Image: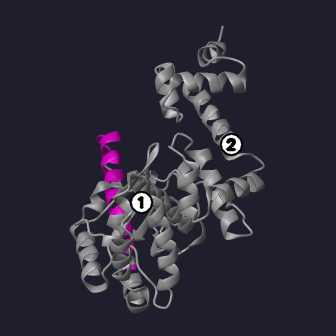
Amino acid sequence: MGNEPNLRAGALNHPLLREVNELALRCCGISFLIVYPAGDHWGQAIPGKINQPEFCSLIKTSEQGGKQCRMSHVMMSIAACRGGITEHRCHAGSLTLIHPLSDEKDGTVALVSSCLSALGKQHASWDEARKVGKTLGLNLRKLKKAHAALPALDDNGQLAREFMQMAVDIIKEIQFKIYIETRLEEALSSRPGNHNLSQVLVDKLTTTSPDCAAKPQSISTSKIEKMIRITADLITEQPGMPYNVEEVAASMRISPNHFSSEFHRCTGKRFSDFLTEKRIARSKTLLTDITLNIEEVALKAGYADSSYYARKFKQRTGKTPTQWRESMVPA
């Protein structure tokens, strides 16, 4: 994933963005949320009021449904940044519009709409939603009524996309303005007494950032393979996140067994082995930071139980984390 700067709070709280979100709700029945990486997890920000369809609220009444929903948002956002997907079906079968907020192919920040339906496809969509609702133990009568009340993409699609583009443009403009202001403050504070302000700005704004380094885009031959590659890339970059086969599979709308077999086919490794490999590799880097104790290293690498982490580490390296750390210290 890209190492793009964190989404700035000023952009999320801007009154113009809140107004566009509220207009989209009144005119199209949809609202937006922003999905972005936040350290070792993923954050979701909602401009303005929290307005989501009853269908989404019912799905999220289940703890498992809420987790699947968040993971689905993450996977759809990354896919949109990688391949420009603008319309996707969530884990519960409903349609969602997604627009990348990064111009980079390895970006990870995206604007996601609340759920919609498509005329002529409600029956198939409901069949999928019903299966999800049954698995989550939800009241299917209430869920069906809420599903039927979802705004139709066919009626509001063009206007919804225009509102989404407007919101994206606003966020990018505000982000750039805040970026320039921050650079200017840094320039002035780092060069007291320097009267050549134009040169200071040129120096600051034309400095090549490692964030701009290009990365090769994953190549895929099918939608599932593409999502598997995205998952593998995500684990490689952020192994400390709480991954779960059931949740990842649900976000891709395939069964856990199907996901596991496809993951093994695409990567040559079982999901659990791949995840352990990346987490142990991450922990080795963390162990070089002597300010972190073993418990902290384990937690940051994705292990809530430090004893379990130590066993896994020794299985992989032949040493305990402490022994490995000591062997890395120069004599």
> In front here: 90 or 187?
90
Q: Is residue 187 magenta?
A: yes
Query: In the rendered structure, does residue 287 fall within the stretch colored magenta?
Result: no
The way the protein has been coloured in the rendering is one colour
The mark lying in front, picked from 2 and 1, is: 1
Whole-percent x, y for residue 8 in the image: 34, 55
Question: Residue at the location (50% across, 68% down)?
Answer: 131
Residue type at tag 2: Phe
| Above/below status of 67 relative to 133 | above
Question: As displayed, is residue 138 above or below residue 129?
Answer: above
- Please name whichever residue, 181 or 228, is drawn nearer the observer in this view of the structure: 228
In the image, which disc is placed on residue 90?
none
The residue stretch that appears in magenta: 165-194
Residue 273 seen anywhere in this rendered image of the structure: yes
Residue of label 1: 137
Q: CA distance from mark 2 to mark 1?
A: 32 Å
**Which quadrant of the structure image shows residue 328?**
top right
Q: Residue at point 32% right, 58% down?
A: 178
Q: Write the residue at 22% across / 66% down.
A: 49
Q: Is residue 14 above or below residue 280?
A: below
- Image quadrant assignment for residue 330: top right
What crowding class fits label 1: few (fewer than 14 Cα within 10 Å), some (14-19), or many (20 or more)?
few
Q: Nearer the viewer, residue 16 or 136?
A: 136
- 157 lies above or below 111: below
Mark 2, other Cα within 10 Å: few <14 / some 14–19 / many ≥20: some
Residue 76: x percent and y percent?
Answer: 52, 65
Of helix, strand and loop, which mostly describes the magenta segment? helix
Check disc 2 and report its element: helix, strand or loop. helix
SS at mark 1?
loop
Viewer-proximal residue, 7 or 184? 7
